[in-house]
Image: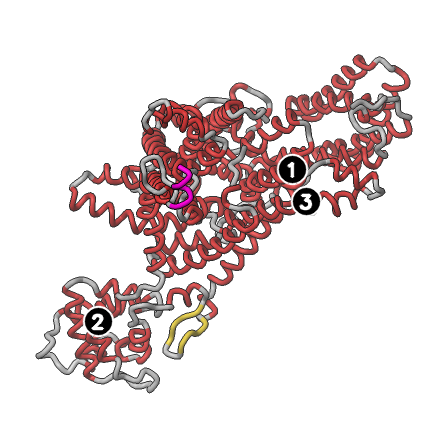
Amino acid sequence: MTTPISRKPLSMVVPTVAVAGAFLGLFVGTANGSGLMGVVIGAALMGALAFALTTLWGNESASRWSVVALLGALGFLLGSIPGLILGLLAGWFFGWFIFWLFEGRYRGHLQPYLTSGQVFWHYAFRVICGAIFVFLITPILVVIPLSFNAQDFFTFTPEMLRFDPAGYSLKHYEDFFTNNEWQRSFQNSLIIAPIATLISVSLGTLAAIGLSQSHVPGKRAIMAMLISPMIVPLIISATGMFFFYSQIGNFLEGTVGMSKNLVGYIKVILAHAVLGVPFVIITVTATLVGFDRSLTRAAANMGADPVTTFFKVQMPLILPGVISGGLFAFITSFDEVVVVLFVGSASQKTLPWQMFTGLREQISPTILAVATILVVISIALLTTIELLRRRSERLRGMSPA
Amino acid sequence: MADTTANGPVLAADGTPLKQSLARSLRRQKMRALMLIAPLLVFVLLSFIFPIASMLFRSVENGIVQDTLPETVAALQQWDEQSGELPDEEVYAAFIRDMIIAVDNKEHTRLGSRLNYEETGMSSMFRRSGRAIGRLDPVEDAPFKEALIDIHDGWGEVGTWQTIKTHAVPLTNGYFLNAVDMQRTVDGAQAQPESKQILITLFGRTLQMSLIITGACILLGYPIAWLLANLRMRTANLLMILVLLPFWTSLLVRTSAWKVMLQQQGVINDTLVWLGLVDDAARLVIINNQIGTIIAMTHILLPFMILPMYSVMQTIPPSYTRAAKSLGATNWTAFWRVYFPQSVPGIGAGSILVFILAIGYYITPEIVGGTKGVFISNRIAYHISSSLNWGLAAALGTILLAAVLILYWAYDRIVGIDNVKLGG
């Protein structure tokens, strides 16, 4: 919907811009000695700017560029390169803000009957939500530039803020790819997670198909048991497994005579497979809800045996659910630290374990490089799951949401 | 054909009665479903449910005293522990006979550390006396009462024998009493000395911080869920990425990010100092305490609050609020009386989920919590891997598990297990 927009009186535009200017001035002022001076100067400067640009000049795009240039220069004077960047951003914002208010564009896509209080609340609410989104995403974004730090610090060095190339380096990545400890733990993760996933996906898919049949005695109890690894706090699962697998390990080493290393891997893989099961069960059962049972009957009618029906008819249709369940199981194992800490021994050290000890004892900036790599991996996984979900909904004839 | 329907039972194509035939096919169907479930069920039962059950059993299991000192325990039955007098020679002789066997099998130190959980000093007493007792002869060196008190003064104290007698039962409630800052004594359950009372405080803190985190998640999650549910689909999906990306990012990545942000020389403090809001000498202490844990865990658990809220709010038709407004309700009334009640199931689902997850958290408090911001889980881990008091760890774990299962039961009541959604 569009509401006809009209120019707003200066008595509204100038004070609002001045308030925003005062807010900006508060920060600039405190950074340079006096907050009060900053508020006064910021309010006066921005108020005057709004008045001058809207009534005296009127050429919108030229005015906006001049605000950008003015605040950029001011920022450069006060805080050199980082100041320049913040100044340019502030200039862009104020240029846009002044004309957005003055031309009344802010009402453009709102219902025409809203009172000005409601309009104010509409935008205030969006600012609050924006702040929460910033809270959600900042920790993840902050890690990425810090991982290119040339120093062994965990904060932005003055060189980095000046965008001096000397402040950046790939040395933490180099450390990750050359350091034996990190490489071995990475390899361990790459061995343990896929095998654990394979076990939980194959057993989990079969069980989910069984659970989705119409007459299963004790369905709720079975479901509760299979989901329990997700509900029981990890520390309790880890404690239980610690005692159980030390006995199993002694048995395998002593009676069966397997090597210590192999037994260690078996223990961790089995423990992780159990933790991945609930995710497979939940996603695959959800996919099976929309599965048309007459398809299997039709296949049987045409002479296919149950195994052929499963692989040729049922499996291709529920594959998206199976894969996303598998990804969940994979990430559970790949990200898991408590259980491996209790069940595994030093030669099964996984990547999260290495990070955990790194964080607890000698915190090294290589962790940030690892964290960045993991963020990239999780973005890739997120994309895959989203694509699979859309495909699954298309196959089942729903419109992708 | 009409005759058969009138006289006999209805027959299936192969001649068996239809009822029987249907029952058989139903039975076969059930069997097939169970066969499919069986491998996983056995796997989960064996390697998850059974280990946890046997771990929980450790919280009451206490065979060690009776197994190591069988004759002493029997002899102590005759002794009146309330009398305030030492047991007679018979008990001492039985004790020496038991200890000589125990020292041979090197079991006396284990018993010592078990009793040390109840009475500090027992461990070193058993270890030191063990060597001397090993050299005695059970027949020739009698009487033992004086000899044993010579070896260590502790054997001449009534308290020592009281401790052995009270903890000689094969199944004990002692660990559970310890878990709630009490102890098993001759006079029944008593409160621990003040200096040892830390667990109730820790339980209280775990509950309180989990509630604060849940509350913070509701406050931050509600506006976001509302916004996502009321925006156009395309914009909402884009913004959803900002919620799902943290959800999918490794827990350790997020924890290390917070460690980096919250440090004294970290990003938040540096920014505040640069802006001049905080003096360089008075940097905020926001890590290694409760605030650090609360901030980091609120961030980590926020997606678990937003996703269930969002899925509930999506089903609330926006026309309801519009109708309320057109009937004369103010903005606030329309929200509070019309929209909010319909979104309560979402809040309930999200809160229980976040609370269940928060109460059992281990990694994040361990890294950003210092000593003041840790949870009961950290104490369990400490007893498992450092103090080796496994019985107490099991008792604490049982209490925690019971709390989680009750909450989970409530969650099932409110939302249903089948409605657990996994982000997207």
Question: Which residue is label 2 attached to?
Answer: B69
Q: CA distance from mark 3 to mark 2?
A: 65 Å
- Residue located 90% across and 19% down the image: A55
Which chain letter matches label 3? B
Question: Which residue is label 1 attached to?
Answer: B315
Mark 2 element type: loop
Residue A344 image position (x, y, % from top left): 31, 42
Q: CA distance from mark 1 to mark 3?
A: 9 Å
- Magenta part of the chain: B1-7
Neighbour tally class for label 3: few under 14, some 14-19, many 20 plus, Cα within 10 Å: some
Neighbour tally class for label 1: few under 14, some 14-19, many 20 plus, Cα within 10 Å: few
Q: Nearer the viewer, mark 1 or mark 2?
A: 1
Residue B420 image position (x, y, % from top left): 51, 41
Amino acid of disc 1: Thr
Tell me where residue A35 sits by quadrant: top right
Neighbour tally class for label 2: few under 14, some 14-19, many 20 plus, Cα within 10 Å: many
Which chain letter matches label 2? B
Which sits earlier in the primary sequence, circle 1 or circle 3? 1
Which sits earlier in the primary sequence, circle 3 or circle 2? 2
Amino acid of disc 2: Leu
Marks 1 & 3 on one chain: yes
Marks 1 & 2 on one chain: yes
- Relative placement, left or right, of B246 versus B229 is left
Mark 3 element type: helix
| Picture quarter with the C terminus of chain B | top right
| Picture quarter with the N terminus of chain B | top left
